[in-house]
Image (cartoon, grey):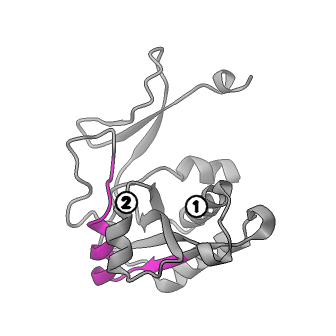
Amino acid sequence: MIQELVLKNRSYRRFYQNVHVETKTLKELVNLARLSPSGANRQSLKYILSNTQESNVKIFNTLGWAGYIKSWDGPPEGEKPGAYIVMLKDLSVGASLPQDEGIAAQSILLGAVEKGLGGCIIVNVNRKELAAKFDLQDNYEIVLVIALGRPKEEVVIENMDQSGDVKYWRDENGVHHVPKRALDEIII
């Protein structure tokens, strides 16, 4: 059921680092993005797949992990993602429309959940540094990075309180809490 996949599709930031994500799996996930709708059918998104320690380190060091948790620099050794998918715009085939990026990322993440994996869309990326590390040509622009792996943390959806505070937090047990607005509040 799609609702179950959506509920399991949280922003996971801690993983079982020793669980390898196969290249075949990454290709299957990107294929879901490829088959998804594309504005004006431009299909201008391209992807870098990473699942080796060498390339994962290149990517990890360019990422910002949790904006609302200021004291946290990201997952420690042993809890880092097993893989990444770097989403690029190929400017040589025309600019992608903004919705393409979200549709593609959601397709990838829902596919990951179906395979027992989890992920996190990261847009806090040092794009210049990451582009240099992968020697990207000028026609490629980094959009975002999706961290992937077997989740090692629990993420709980909470009802948003009266204050309207949208900030997620971690409790003393490391459980990640995410406030959500009520359905009646978002339907006009």
Q: Which numbered marker is on residue 105?
A: 1
Q: Which residues are magenta?
A: 47-66
- Give me the residue at 60% from left, 78% from top: 28
Tag 2's secondary structure? loop
Quarter of the image with the C terminus in it: top right
Tell me if mark 1 has few (under 14), some (14-19) or many (20+) residues whose alpha carbon lies within 10 angstroms of its own.
many
**Left/right of residue 131 with respect to residue 137 in the rendered view:** left
- Give me the residue at 61% from left, 50% from top: 6
- Residue closest to the eye, 163 or 40: 40
Q: Position of residue 125 (x, y in %)?
A: 37, 60
- Give me the residue at 32% from left, 60% from top: 63
Amino acid type of the residue that numbered disc 1 sits on in the rendered structure: Ala
Q: Which numbered marker is on residue 125?
A: 2
Residue farthest to the top, as pictured:
162
Tag 1's secondary structure? helix
- Residue closest to the eye, 116 or 118: 118
Closer to the chain start, of discs 1 and 2, is 1
**Left/right of residue 61 with respect to residue 34 in the rendered view:** left
